[in-house]
Amino acid sequence: MTDTKENAKGLLLDIQDLTIQYVTDSGTVHAVENLNLQLGHGETLGFVGETGAGKTTTALGIMRLIPSPPGVIRSGKILFEGADLLKKSEAEMRAVRGAKIAMIFQDPMTSLNPVMTVDKQIAEMIRLHRSVTDAEALNLAGDMLELVGIRRERMHDYPHQFSGGMKQRVVIAIALACDPGLLIADEPTTALDVTIQAQVLELMKKLKQQFDASMILITHDLGIVAEICDRVAIMYAGRVVEYADKHALYRRPLHPYTIGLFNSVPDLEEDKEELAVIPGLMPDPMDLPTGCTFHPRCSFATEECPVTKPDMIEAAPGHFVACPVRAAAQAGSESRGGEGQ
């Protein structure tokens, strides 16, 4: 899934046919199935889907942090700066984590050491990847705190002395301390109230531009995606089912699941008593439906859908969808010069 823009800029991250499973006594969880995903230099990719879709597992796979056992990366490639991360040794991956790829988790308290002051936690990351003295690392830690909007005099405080939004700023400071090329943010504002969410997102947007980093933003909030992201990947039951430029996706979503997500978002300009919902539930990852995994919930399903697993089709330039029915509808619309769904 590449386009001329990505070819011109070059790909920073190229995930090819990635399959990740969790093997348990109860059965095999198909968390990520034959996933393909690309990210260009300086781009922000929104990774959208319901809980259990496989978004966080994909992120942990990129970081090579899948817990094993029970997690197993069955197949695929994760090419970062042209090198396959799955072929690197653990020592080589330790050099990548933090320095080249950093991750921000949704709950900052799980990322921060409660018995260390925040300056020492940032300095620890800096010392791991830079040749600096302890004093220089601590001074740089103070600079990073100021960069994320925390006064330097608070650098000797402990995590419990900060609010939720301030703790998330500390986590962002740690993630950016070594100027990584790729920042993975796993629902970074979930634990924050709405006003603080906006502040943290604006901060991340500004710092991403300042550091010229690429970012994968994992979220289920389409509003956040519209505000921050350049491209969007919609994930369902371990697979990317739609991948497109943000403007193309919001202007004309193609996959039935994507359409369902947009229909479930309240519209301030429409007077509705009830929101449209997607019927049914996410499938059991231990027992996925045959063919297209979305077909039991899909109003566009045909007799072929339970039989054949759909490939990603480029329905429009740079707009890919794993649904031949909707891809054909898009092609027919373009041939007629129409825009209706």
Image: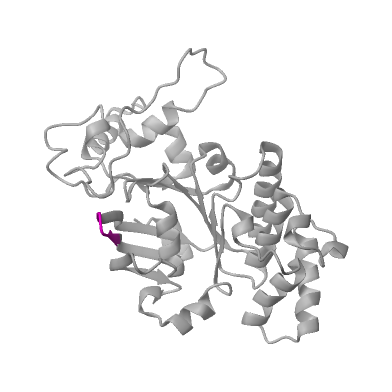
Q: Is residue 228 above or below residue 32?
A: above
Q: Position of residue 157 (x, y in %)?
A: 81, 63
Please name the colour scheme applied to the rendered image. one colour
Q: Visible in this render: residue 13?
A: no
Residue sitting at 32 percent across and 64 percent down?
A: 16
In the foreground, 284 or 32: 284
Residue sitting at 82 percent across and 67 percent down?
A: 156
Instruction: Say which quarter of the image contains residue 332.
Output: top left
Instruction: Say which quarter of the image contains residue 15.
Output: bottom left
Judged left or right of residue 206, residue 139 is: right
Picture quarter with the C terminus: top left
Q: Position of residue 86 (x, y in %)?
A: 36, 74
Magenta span covers which residues?
Answer: 22-27
Residue sitting at 27 percent across and 49 percent down?
A: 312
Judged left or right of residue 108, residue 306 is: left
Residue sitting at 25 percent across and 50 percent down?
A: 286
Judged left or right of residue 3, residue 306 is: left
